[in-house]
Image: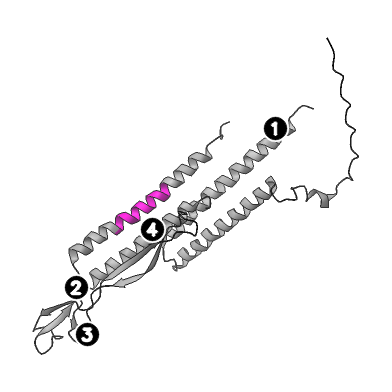
Amino acid sequence: MGLFDVFAISGSGTNLNRIWLDCVSDNIANINTVKSTSETAFQARYVVAQSADGFAAGDPKGVNVTGIALGNPEGRVVYEPDNPLADTDGYVRRPDIDLGDQMTQLIQAQRGYQANLAVVERATQAYQTALQIGRNA
Amino acid sequence: MSITGIGIVPPVGPLGPAGGVGAATRVASPQGSGFATSLAGAVDNLSAVQSKADGLAVQAATGTLTNAHDYLIAASEASLTTQMTVAVRNKAIEAFNEIMRMPL
């Protein structure tokens, strides 16, 4: 463990939440992406997080983003005969993404980002208080 | 009442050869655990932290920075490390001056 490990750990948490924000924004941006039934639908993006434990048990190392998981490729098959992408029966494929769920995740990611940066700020204040020890002695 | 005798004063050992400039650099303990070694390590660490923050500052200026928080966190860490190293150095100098003021 180093002296200022909290910065690396909180930085990894902040990074995770930034990637989560990217995923949510991608999901919301593509919520109306329509595909023909012969193709796979736009797949929702999910962040895969894993704790980066050190070899020593309980040694805090922060969090790692191990990848981006993809959602349901089937999507929702919707009857839209007017859509130019519709098949002969009038069906198209829309992504299986719920906007309400994405907005909830957006708030979670935003708050998570803020929480990690709040840790950085508090740790800075705490260390600065430690540096005041004996300053006026 | 018996008075205990004064013990024999141990003989003063022979003075070693006067160290030149070359010898002065070896004042830090040979085991590498002296204060000078610690301070040198702290300064090396400070240099590494500052160069990391500098690299991120260049990335921020050139627009290649992917994480804005990375730079701010690194800058904050560099500032704290500098403050700490300077505080330790000031305390060491204070202690040294205290020793120098000791009446002989």
Dot 3 or dot 2, earlier in sequence: 3
Amino acid type, residue under disc 2 in the picture = Asp
Q: Which of the two discs, 4 and 3, sits closer to the camera? A: 3
Q: Is residue A32 magenta?
A: no
Q: Are marks 4 and 1 on the same chain?
A: no
Between residue B7 and residue A108, name the one nearer to us.
B7
Element at badge 4? helix
Q: Chain of mark 4?
A: A
Dot 4 or dot 2, earlier in sequence: 4
Q: Chain of mark 1?
A: B
Q: Quadrant of residue A101?
A: bottom left
Task: Write down the residue under mark 3.
Answer: A39
Q: Is residue A102 above or below residue A6?
A: below
Q: Chain of mark 2?
A: A
Disc marking residue A96: 2
Magenta residues span: A109-121
Residue A13: give x, y in percent of width and height: 39, 58
Label 4, label 1: how many angstroms apart (C-alpha)?
Answer: 46 Å
Q: Is residue B7 above or below residue B50?
A: above
Q: Crowding near pointer 3: few (<14 within 10 Å), some, many (20+)?
A: few
Q: Which of the two discs, 4 and 1, sits closer to the camera? A: 4
Q: Chain of mark 3?
A: A
Label 3, label 2: how many angstroms apart (C-alpha)?
Answer: 14 Å
Would you say A82 lies left or right of B81 here?
A: left
Among all residues in the image, which is located at the extreme front? B1
Amino acid type, residue under disc 3 in the picture = Glu
Residue A46: give x, y in percent of width and height: 29, 68
Disc 4 to disc 3: CB gap under 8 Å: no
Task: Write down the residue under mark 4.
Answer: A14
Amino acid type, residue under disc 4 in the picture = Thr
